[in-house]
Image: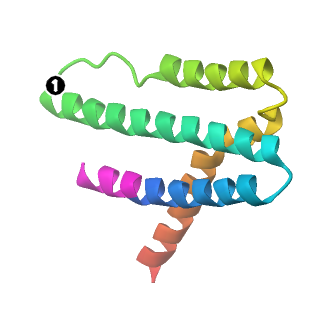
Amino acid sequence: MPELHQMFNRQRKYIIYVLSIYVLGWGFTTHKSEFLGLILGTVLSLYMHWGMTKRVSKFGDAVVEGKKVRSLGTTSRMAAAALGVIIATRFPETFHLLSLIIGLMTTYIVIMIDYFFSSFKTNK
């Protein structure tokens, strides 16, 4: 599954660019809690994306070998999102909850944009 890892590496690079924009926003604007919520959500989202990529790779290897696979880690992804919400509700003056939720969705937005760009390149 080298193309899965190539996709992940490309998407990880884009997410790190987005995170750097969030850090600049946190450093140079007065909206500190909003940008900290975006940063926390995006970091958790990147962690969930990394875990999903690792589990899908193991899943593919197990299918090829004919072995049984446990799960793709839905519980761990839900726990990471719940952890972010708990942190944001525990420290509402530091982390903005809606920004955290938007940050959790950042990876999915990056995946969709990457898909459209890569499908546009292959159609040319």
Taking the image as shown, residue 118 lies to the left or right of residue 93, namely left
Up/down of 120 relative to 42, above or below:
below
Say which quarter of the image contains residue 13: bottom left
The magenta-colored residue range is 1-9
- Residue 77 or 61: which is nearer the viewer? 77
What's under tag 1, amino acid-wise?
A: Gly
Q: Give the main secondary structure, helix, strand or loop, of the magenta stretch.
A: helix
State the image coordinates of residue 85 (x, y, percent, origin top left).
71, 23
Q: Hey, which quadrant is residue 123 in on the image? A: bottom left
Tell me which corner region of the image, top left, top right, bottom left or bottom right, holds residue 6.
bottom left
Q: Residue at x 73, y 36 (%)?
A: 101
The residue lying at 33 percent from left, 35 percent from top is 54
Which secondary structure lies at badge 1?
Answer: loop
Residue 122 sits above or below residue 42 on the image? below
Is residue 5 on the magenta stretch? yes
Most foreground residue, 72 or 104: 104
